[in-house]
Image (cartoon, rainbow, N blue to C red):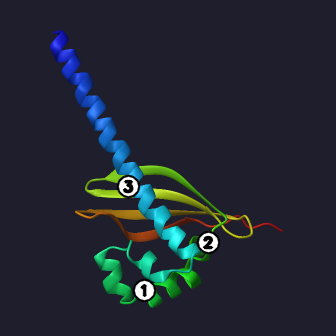
Amino acid sequence: MRFLLVTIVAVFVAQSAVAEERIAGIENTIRSQVDAFLAEDAPTAFSYASPNIKRLFGTPERFGMMVQKGYPMVWSPSEVRFLELRRQGPLVFQKVLFMDANGAPHVLEYNMLQTEGGWLIDGVQYLAAPPVGA
């Protein structure tokens, strides 16, 4: 009986370690892309995009221009906070809170793709617009 208990605990510990590694890999990918945007390094930022995104935009320059114009809070955030990670079947989604240069919050959800080389970003969806004040 004791052997069974030790085995079950070992399995849970191993699964927890794998989950933590997955979360760290996803956060590192997103953070590295944001760091590249902050350095205005579109080629490096583009390297964290999935093959689908690379086909869609074609060049790092077009990709960088799209992010700069369409997602300025990602191009130049004042703060980045990782929120919940969720799995939907084989898909993995990471919510991220970005504070823009004016301090307004923006919540985006990253669709992540696991490859042999690590995690890549396969799309981003805008979830929450900043609040509007008078």
Disc 2 is placed on an element classified as helix
Q: CA distance from mark 3 to mark 2?
A: 22 Å
Residue occupied by mark 1: 60
Foreground residue among 73 and 44: 44
SS of the residue under disc 3? helix
Q: Nearer the viewer, mark 1 or mark 2?
A: 1
Location of residue 11 (image quadrant)? top left
SS state under label 1: helix
What's the mark number on residue 73? 2
Tag 3: amino acid: Gly
Label 1 sits on what residue type?
Answer: Pro
Specify the quadrant that holds the C terminus: bottom right
Callout 3–callout 2 Cβ contact below 8 Å = no
Q: Residues within 10 Å of mark 1 (few under 14, many from 20)?
A: some
Q: Residue 13: which numbered mark, if any?
A: none
Please tell me how crowded label 2 is: few (under 14), some (14-19), or many (20+) other residues with Cα within 10 Å: many
The answer to whether residue 52 is left or right of residue 23 is: left
**Residue at (56%, 80%) from the top-left corner?**
40
* Dot in front, 3 or 2: 3
Residue 18, how many percent across, how many down? 30, 43
Above or below: residue 96 compared with residue 63:
above
Q: Earlier in the sequence, mark 3 or mark 2?
A: 3
Q: Is residue 48 visible?
A: yes
Quadrant of the image for the N terminus?
Answer: top left
Determine which residue is flagged by label 3. Answer: 25
Crowding around mark 3 (Cα neighbors within 10 Å: few <14, some 14 to 19, many 20+) is: some
Q: Which amino acid, by three-letter code, is at mark 2? A: Met
Q: Residue furthest top?
A: 1
